[in-house]
Image: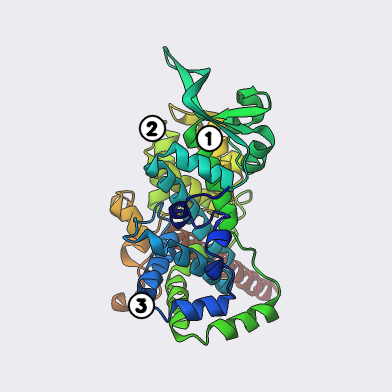
Amino acid sequence: MSIPTDLVNRYPWLPSLKLQYSDIADKEPSEFISDLFSKGDSKQISERVLLIFEFAFNNLEDIPNPKDENLSIQVYILLKILIYALNNKLITNRIANLYSKNAYNKMERDNSESDLYNICLDLELRVNFYDPPEKFGIKILKDNRERKITNFTIYYIDYLKLASKLRDDYRKLTHNSLKNGYVYIQNRNLMRLIQEYVRTKILVEETEDKASLKSFLEEVLKIQEFKELYEKIKNIWAKKEEDFDFSFKIDITNKTDILKLYPPCVLEILKKAKEGQNLVHHERLFIVWFLLALEYPVEHVVDIFSTLPDFDREKTNYQVEYAKKKKYTPYQCSTLQSISLCKKEKYKDTLCLEGYGSIEPSERKKLKHPLAYVRIKQYRDEKEGEFLKSKEKREQEESQKKNE
């Protein structure tokens, strides 16, 4: 079955891309790039791709709507080529998360059952469409009972394939209504399954074949416009990489004074949680991402929320597990300031207020990220420990000499 061409323009990750736009999709990367940058709209496409990378590097959730949907195919293919060329798992995961979330938001905004049905058909999902909608199950919210309705059922095997990597408890087959092997699924949940398909479609494993990658880069970087875009993305990443590269380890089991390594923004949230105060959405996200970045066990992170008035262990455990899988990066200092979570003034923290790196005030570097705070504190802690050990050793040696 052939789906409408405008649907492929809006959702270029659909399989029909290769059928309806084979003249573009089947080209070798170097040929595609060469043709692309020989046309007048190449600048607009480059800017669109660059915007996607910038948004992904800043952990943003949605991409602004483009003025021209007809360029989305070129944007999609160029994006895939750049992901392969950059060969960086951190970058790839962020692009996949953002692009798939944007696909979900677009489907939700379009709000078209017919488009959703055509998307399912193109993905070769066995679905049934009902008009008027079918009634199934009961939704209970407090004292209200509401009959659930849907336009769709999906064959259980196709459902399981799409839902296999989604760990929501309510997505388990046993928690869903079935009829003759088909699962009743509401529109938004079906869109969520398709979102996961898009995410995996974007993911490209880091290649171990460095020789092939080098040869590929030598070929595509001959095209000056592509090289400039590639270098621009790498330069942006180089400035952001410090915020994402937190490979240092902290042994939380052996550090009884680990709290002294934490910045005031973290201490404030932990204090509120300990007191049983409710945390706002940004506080919850930030503390989870921060602790997971330090490789806290999931159960330890979940326990932090156990004092909150709306605590649900099963739900919280799922959300923390999901955040761990996505590898989100904690907010940087500028973001914490913009959402009023920075507490350097309240705690009068010297490192946050004055920076680091030099005794001379004019040469001190400003702190950009709370994980950098931990890194610096850990470094100072270790150096202080080495100094104290060295001092103790010298004192023992001097004491022995006096006794001789």
Residue 58's x, y, as percent? 41, 60
Residue 262 appears anywhere in the view: no
Q: Gap between marks 3 and 1, in whole Å?
A: 50 Å
Q: Earlier in the sequence, mark 3 or mark 2?
A: 3
Distance, label 3 to label 2, CA atoms, is: 56 Å
Kindly state the secondary structure of the residue where label 3 is placed: loop
Relative depth, front residue between 300 and 190: 190
Picture coordinates of residue 394 (x, y %)?
61, 73
Q: Amino acid at mark 1?
A: Thr
Q: Is residue 379 above or below residue 175?
A: below
Residue linked to disc 2: 277
Mark 3: amino acid = Gly
Residue 329, compared with residue 88, is above or below; it is above
Report which residue position mark 3 lands on.
40
> Which residue appears farthest toward the front when viewing the image?
1
First in sequence, mark 3 or 1: give its number. Answer: 3
Pointers 2 and 1 in contact (CB under 8 A)?
no
Label 2 Cα crowd, 10 Å radius (few <14 / some 14-19 / many 20+): some
| Amino acid on which disc 2 is placed | Gln
Residue 401, given in percent of the width and then of the height, sits at 67, 76
- Which residue in the protein does label 1 denote? 316
For image coordinates 49% across by 57% down, the residue present is 12
Question: Relative to residue 163, is residue 343 drawn left or right?
Answer: left
Which of these two is toward me, 197 or 359? Answer: 197
